[in-house]
Every structure is written in C-alpha cells, then in structure tokens.
Image (cartoon, rainbow, N blue to C red):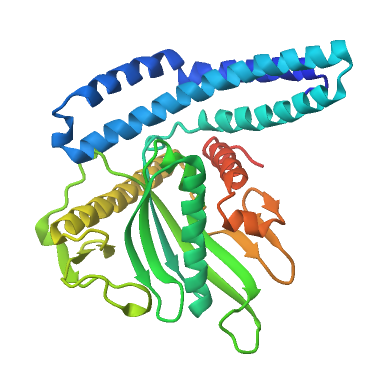
Amino acid sequence: MAATDPADEISELSSKLTSVEAVLDPSAMRAEAESLREQAADPDLWGDQQHAQAVTRRLSYVEGELARLEDLRQRLDDTRVMFELADSEHDEPTRAEAQRDLASLRKEIDQLEVRTLLSGEYDAREALVSINAQAGGADAADFAQNLMRMYQRWAERHGYPTEVYDISYAEEAGIKSTTFAVKAPYAYGTLRGEHGTHRMVRISKYDNQGRRQTSFAGVDVVPVVEQTDHIEVNEDEIRVDVYRSSGPGGQGVNTTDSAVRITHLPTGIVVSCQNERSQIQNRASAMSVLQAKLLERRRLEEAEEMAALRGEITGSWGTQIRNYVLYPYQNVKDVRTGMETGNTTAVLDGEIDDFIEAEIRWLRRAQNGEKD
C-alpha cells in the first residue's frame, strides 16, 4: 500500500527505483551504449542492413532507458522540493501540481519495476505477432483487424517500430489473418501474455436485424529468431508457393507473383509474406517467421519435458484470455488476472498497458508455482 505522507511515498519510490536500477544496471547499459555507438560509427556497418538496423534499434533503446532512469530520479528530487515549497509557502496550487507529479511517478516506476520481472530465456527478444479470425464470420474478421490496430497503436504509443509481413483480407470486411513484427527489445517478454483467444460481444455491423454477435480471434506471440538459436530447416521439409499479393476485397496490389507461402511439412505450420516487392525478400522474411514458430514449438516441448520430469501437471494458459463486451454494457476483462475496465474505446485504441502489466505479474506467479 502506498504511503500517505508525500515525503514517505517519495522515499518509498526512491527505494523502489534503486531496486530497479540494481537489476537493470545503468553502468553496464552505459558501457553497452558506448560499444553500440562505436559500431554505429563504422562505415562498413551498413554492408549488412539487417545487422545495422538491429544495432541502431538497440542503441536507441539503451539510450532511451538510460534517459528514462535519469529523468525519473531527477523528477523524484524535483517533486520532493515542490512539496517542501508548498508546505513552507502554504501554496495549495503547487501542492496539487506536486500530487499530480507524484501520481505520475508512481505509475511510471511501477511500470519500470514490471520490466525487471522479464527474465525468461527469450523475454529480451523482439516479437512476432500473428492474429487469426476464428468463429464469428465477418464479425470475427472485423475483430481480428481491430486487434491488429490495437497492438499497432500500443506499439506506436511506446515508439516501437512495427513491420507487417502478411495480411490476408476477408471477402466482406476485416482480415482473415496477419503477421507483424514488433521491433523493440523485450517486446516478446512484454507481449507473450497476449497469446490466446480473444472474445468480442457486440451488436453486429453485418447482421441486417442488428442482433448481438459473439466472435473470436486468436493471437499468437513468438520470439524473433537469432543466429545462436540454430533452427535448421531443410529444403526437403518445406513446400514453397508463390502468388500475387492482394489487398482488401481481393484486388491485386502487385503485378508479379512476389508473395511467398511456406508450408513446413513435418509440423503443418504455414507462413506467408507479401510486404516486399521482391520474391527473394519475401521468402527470406517468411523463412524467418517459420523459424520463429519452430523455435517457440521447441521451447514449449522442452518446457513440457522438464515439467514431466518434475512430476508437474502442465496446462495451457493460452486459451480464452480476454473478453471485449461492447453490448449490452461496455467492459473489457482479462479472465486470468481479473483486470478490467469500462473504457473499451481506449483499450481498442491501444491503451493496454494495465492488462499487459497484470499478465506479466500473473505469469511470473504461475512460473513460480504461486496461487492467486
């Protein structure tokens, strides 16, 4: 429970920030930033564009985190001074401003503390997010597109770049499926709790009688593959199909058969990419997505084997995870954590941090065998 006296609460937040800094290690981050700056200054870096982009993204992230830590520490000191000034001058407007600043600091430091819980093997990776319309016809396809926008708006709010690899549009409205990358460190650890089935209840826009419709969409989140993962895919294990990219309504958006679909025959995993003009580039991107899905499959198999050796009973937490009810009332609720809000518009516009933070804490408790 937060302290009621501002001085006590500032002291509490300062201690919490110190604990966060002990985990994040600003000294190591500064050393990493210096190394990354040297790499970025190398004129030969851009000979490998993919590596160069990874270096510059990492540098931007590390510098941003260092600036964030320094800013929070400075703001704590400034807020302490504001309260002291307000008390000495009996200045209620200044005190009210300091209270607002303190509430903002509490939220930001709590968010940063959640980052320290991301210690899984792949948590620091970028993420690949796939969304598939499930039961519900046109409403499910529309819901899948709503979810895609929700995650992209969330990423945009945080300054995280995204790259869409593939979109399969539905005939009437919305999308059948999409795969996109969130290119930010810890994107996988942050978003992996979103994996599962999402359910929407609303008045259907596609029903002539305006009846209530329940629709479902599946979200899959996997970590981006790195060279150290050693995910080998033999040519005789895949089938590669090429086709013409298409947009909403089925219209062609390219005059050549540049889109690529890869089927992994042993597992049945199918991935597609159509965001590039070049068939070669699309094949490379699709192969990266396939390797990421195979990596996640391997991770889950290894986790199940370890659980079996320990005599643990495993269950999938990636089933139905969240309900979005737009009619007869407004509510979004996570069925695992209990987190809920009546501001459905804000959630679908990307304001999902509270849900994500609750998921991270819930997953950490589940991994530690703790009960709610």
In the rendered image, residue 319, in percent from the top left (x then y), is placed at 52, 59
Q: Which quadrant of the figure contains the C terminus?
A: top right
In the rendered image, residue 308, in percent from the top left (x then y), is placed at 41, 45
Pick the residue in front: 323 or 320: 323
Please determine whether, in this image, residue 212 is positioned above or below residue 112: below
Pick the residue in front: 308 or 301: 301
Residue 334 can be seen in this image: no
**Residue in the image at 36% along x and 43% along y:** 183
Give the image quarter of residue 228: top left
**Left or right, residue 330 beside residue 137:** right
Give the image quarter of residue 172: bottom left
**Residue in the image at 25% along x and 39% along y:** 226
Q: Which quadrant of the figure contains the N terminus?
A: top right
Residue 172 can be seen in this image: yes
Q: Furthest residue to the right?
A: 90
Please determine whether, in this image, residue 35 is positioned above or below residue 54: above
In the rendered image, residue 158, in percent from the top left (x then y), is placed at 49, 41
Pick the residue in front: 229 or 33: 33
**Residue in the image at 58% along x and 15% along y:** 18
Please determine whether, in this image, residue 55 is positioned above or below residue 159: above
Pick the residue in front: 240 or 74: 74
**Residue in the image at 35% along x and 15% along y:** 31
In the rendered image, residue 293, in percent from the top left (x then y), is placed at 31, 53
